[in-house]
Amino acid sequence: MAARLQYAQLTKLLEEHYDPKPSMIIQCYKFNTRSCQQGESVQPFVAELAEYCELGQQVDDMLRDGLWCPR
């Protein structure tokens, strides 16, 4: 007999399948290798970098270093 799922459970499963969370490792690699492009403002740069990295308290220091120490 097939398991019956509640609507909320089914919705969550479908969301996870069709819109998976990006890999934290890949996002952190992008964070550590990306540099601000000429003419790019700081706000979009920071938002893009910090969106998926689960760095906790370290994120502020890493953002500072990325902005002030160009690669």
Image: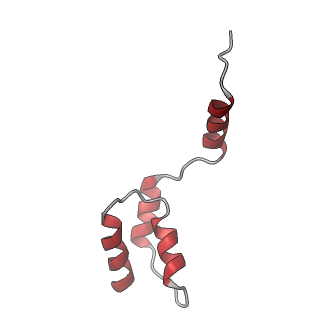
Q: Which residue is rendered at x = 30% and y = 65% of the image?
A: 58
Residue located farthest toward the bottom when viewing the structure as drawn = 39
Q: How many marks?
A: 0
Residue 3 percent coordinates (x, y): 65, 16
Q: Which residue is rendered at x = 64% and y = 42% of the image?
A: 15
Q: Quadrant of residue 32?
A: bottom left
| Residue 46 higher or lower than 37, as above or below | above
Report the side of 13 relative to 48 (left or right): right
| Residue 37 higher or lower than 47, as above or below | below
Report the side of 55 relative to 21 (left or right): left
Residue 35 percent coordinates (x, y): 45, 79
Q: Quadrant of residue 59?
A: bottom left
Residue placed most toward the observer, 20 or 32: 20
Q: Quadrant of the C terminus?
A: bottom left
Residue placed most toward the observer, 9 or 18: 9
Q: How is the image coloured?
A: secondary structure
Residue 22 percent coordinates (x, y): 53, 53
| Residue 24 higher or lower than 67, as above or below | above
Report the side of 65 relative to 40 (left or right): left
Q: Which residue is rendered at x = 31% and y = 63% of the image?
A: 57
Q: Is residue 68 visible?
A: yes
| Residue 24 higher or lower than 3, as above or below | below
Q: Quadrant of the N terminus?
A: top right
Residue 11 percent coordinates (x, y): 67, 36
Q: Which residue is rendered at x = 51% and y = 79% of the image?
A: 43
Q: Is residue 70 visible?
A: no
Report the side of 39 relative to 19 (left or right): left
